Image (spheres, rainbow, N blue to C red):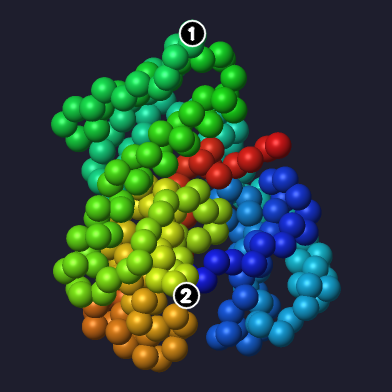
Amino acid sequence: MSAPADQLALFGGEEAVVVRRSGRARRLSLRVFPHGVVEVVAPLRVGERSIRQFVESHADWIAKARGGFRALHGDAGLAPPAELRLAAVDEHWAIDYRDGSGRLRALAGPGGGRLTVPGPVDPHRRIARLRTWLMSRARATLLPWLEAVSAEVGLPYAGASVRRQRSRWGSCSARHTISLNCALLFVEPALVRHLFLHELAHTRHLNHSPRFWRLVATLDPAFELRERELREAWRSVPAWLNHDPI
């Protein structure tokens, strides 16, 4: 989470593979996310050819993992949703799809509200509009939250942004700018706060050294549990958010 991933398009489209270089990694490893993207963690000195061969040698396992997610979620998981439940901020948004032109309208109420999404009956365009709204909602809620946590623990940062990242919850650059994944909106608040603390700790230690983890432990004594839960929290993110069929 400390630096942007090196991205390597080994296949293309929804078969994309993201390669993350790690100074702590001693061997190649991989995992498959619910939206189909494969993340390979590679030691710094391992070359692209070796990574390609590693992925190809695990092709059957990858296909089986992707098939398991498709069986779990089905095509319904890729369709425009009827509602959004944003666990991070305890909001529930009902969604109305209507023919016609105009902008997406958000009528806010206690604990969420209702979204009206106009436009043609095209699932890809509807999802694109929902993604745009979700990004704006993430900027409006996650960025002030991060600022408050930063002030609370006394770890300032240079700037922050929200992105739709496919394999990372967040990152911190060498210039102390933090990037947050809009998918955090679907994650429980305790895990979002831990992610903030993790990235803020990188403003002191831009690595995953023992000193970094000691700082994280000081900020969040339950950090080991939170880290494990974050690795599994992708299951709470709807498939349509990151599935790009084209």
What is the crowding at mark 2: few (fewer than 14 residues within 10 Å), some, or many (at least 20)? few
User: Which quadrant would residue 202 be assigned to in this image?
Assistant: bottom left
**Is residue 64 or residue 3 the one in the foreground?**
3
Is residue 195 visible in this depiction of the protein?
Answer: no
Point 32% across, 59% down: residue:
192
Q: Is residue 77 above or below residue 232?
A: above
**Is residue 184 or residue 56 the one in the foreground?**
184
Point 47% across, 75% down: residue:
174
Q: Position of residue 191 (x, y in %)?
A: 32, 61
Classify mark 2: helix, strand or loop. Answer: loop
Is residue 111 visible in this depiction of the protein?
Answer: yes
**Is residue 67 or residue 17 the one in the foreground?**
17
**Is residue 66 or residue 88 the one in the foreground?**
88
Real-space Cα distance between discs 2 and 1? 46 Å
| Residue named by callout 1 | 100
Q: Position of residue 171 (x, y in %)?
A: 46, 66
Q: Is residue 26 above or below residue 9?
A: below
**Outermost residue toward the top?**
100
Task: Pick whichever of labels 2 and 1 is earlier in the sequence.
Answer: 1
What is the crowding at mark 1: few (fewer than 14 residues within 10 Å), some, or many (at least 20)? few
| Residue named by callout 2 | 174
The three-letter code of the residue at mark 1 reads: Gly
Q: Position of residue 142 (x, y in %)?
A: 30, 51
User: Which quadrant would residue 56 be assigned to in this image?
Assistant: bottom right
The three-letter code of the residue at mark 2 reads: Ala
**Count of numbered marks:** 2
Classify mark 1: helix, strand or loop. Answer: loop
Point 35% across, 45% down: residue:
138
